[in-house]
Image (cartoon, rainbow, N blue to C red):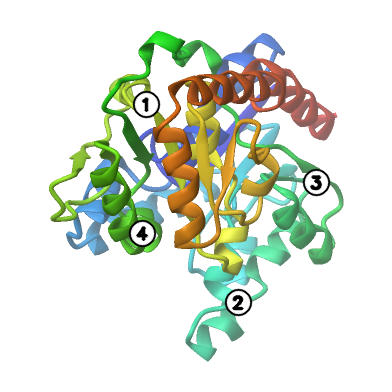
Amino acid sequence: MMVKMLARYSRNGASSRLRFLQYREELQTAGIESEFSPLFSENYLDKLYSGRDTFVSAFRSYVGRGSELLSRSANDLLWIQSESLPWLPWAIEAGLLPRQVPRVVDCDDAIFHRYDLHRKAAVRSLLGSKVDRLMESSSLVTAGNEYLAERAHAAGAQRVEIVPTVVDMKRYACKSASDYKSDPVIGWIGSPSTWREYMVPLIPTLAEIAKLENARIHAVGGEASGDALVDTIPWVESEEATRLRSMDIGIMPLTDTPWSRGKCGYKLIQYMASGLPVVASPVGVNAEIVEDGVNGFLASSPAEWREALTVLLRDPDLRHKMGVEGRKKVEKQYSLSVWGPKVACLLKQVMG
């Protein structure tokens, strides 16, 4: 059996790495060979995150993807990350996708809201139902959370299964009680875009707390904030687990928007896999992952963020206790060892 993974990004893109690449070994164990085919290259992603022009890189990517779809290579299944040709109308994508090959659409972000909630009426009219049409025409939609699954059902998808974003527990060492420092670190990991949208508004509150409690803030993958208490650390995959282990608390602020409700809580799962207590906004799947008072705290207002972080910063034993509970939850519900065989089984069912 051969599956072609039509991913959006190369390995440097977290969603492509986690929703596709990390399953390859499990698929092979189940007798499924896979070909990973990203639309955009690492060069494109580097340019995107650094604010450089991406037009030429994007144009080449679309030409390559179009040629790939027209080649009609021998595949038993197409596994598509949200859509195969972003920002192009459904009629074009439908015309290029081979009709005789079954397809599975994986959705771990509310990509459809880029279109149906776009500020321009022309985009809403032309592309507003595009992702829905793709989901409707697919044999299976795997959704990262209930919000995304509900959209797939509403679109008329033949079959919808919730598959959370998971982690390979072998990559994450759990902090011990002795690992928690006297000068603790509040940690965040993500991309420049999520940093600007969710973290920048919270920095004054975080800096105030950090100053009072002799703590620091580590921003892995973020941008310079100008605050002396914030250490901006470049994201490097090989150093990811080490960076997480250097933290004492993991945070995931979100604003309550349709786009945010489509988030799958990957940061929280990484923190918890590393044995960290967490503080997060109670938006979307965050409220399912975080058991308030057990493996972390949910915080909606600046006052709640201050209270939750202050309690954790002052109590290393509580941080350890919550970190252990978080690790247990990830092992049971969000680990690759649990979900790898399940995903392989789902794909085999589609291929018959």
Amino acid tagged 2? Asp
Point 48% across, 87% down: residue: 120
Point 58% across, 62% down: residue: 93
Q: Name the mark on residue 202.
A: 4
Q: Return the x and y of residue 229 as percentages of the image width and height.
A: 18, 44
Amino acid tagged 4? Leu
Q: Quadrant of residue 203?
A: bottom left
Q: Return the x and y of residue 309 as percentages of the image width and height.
A: 44, 43
Q: Nearer the viewer, mark 1 or mark 2?
A: 1
Q: Name the mark on residue 139.
A: 3
Element under label 1?
helix
**If you read the primary sequence from the N terminus, does the residue marked by circle 1 or circle 2 appear first?**
2
Element under label 4?
helix
What residue is shown with label 2? 116
**If you read the primary sequence from the N terminus, does the residue marked by circle 4 or circle 2 appear first?**
2
**214 horizontally vs 151: left or right:** left
Point 51% across, 36% down: residue: 278
Amino acid tagged 3? Ser
Q: Residues within 10 Å of mark 4 (few under 14, many from 20)?
A: some
Q: Nearer the viewer, residue 137 or 95?
A: 137
Quadrant position of the C terminus in the picture: top right
Element under label 2?
helix
Element under label 3?
loop
Q: Nearer the viewer, mark 4 or mark 3?
A: 4
Q: Name the mark on residue 260.
A: none
**14 horizontally vs 258: left or right:** left
Q: Name the mark on residue 244.
A: 1
**CA gap, disc 4 to disc 2?**
28 Å
Q: Nearer the viewer, residue 140 or 251?
A: 251
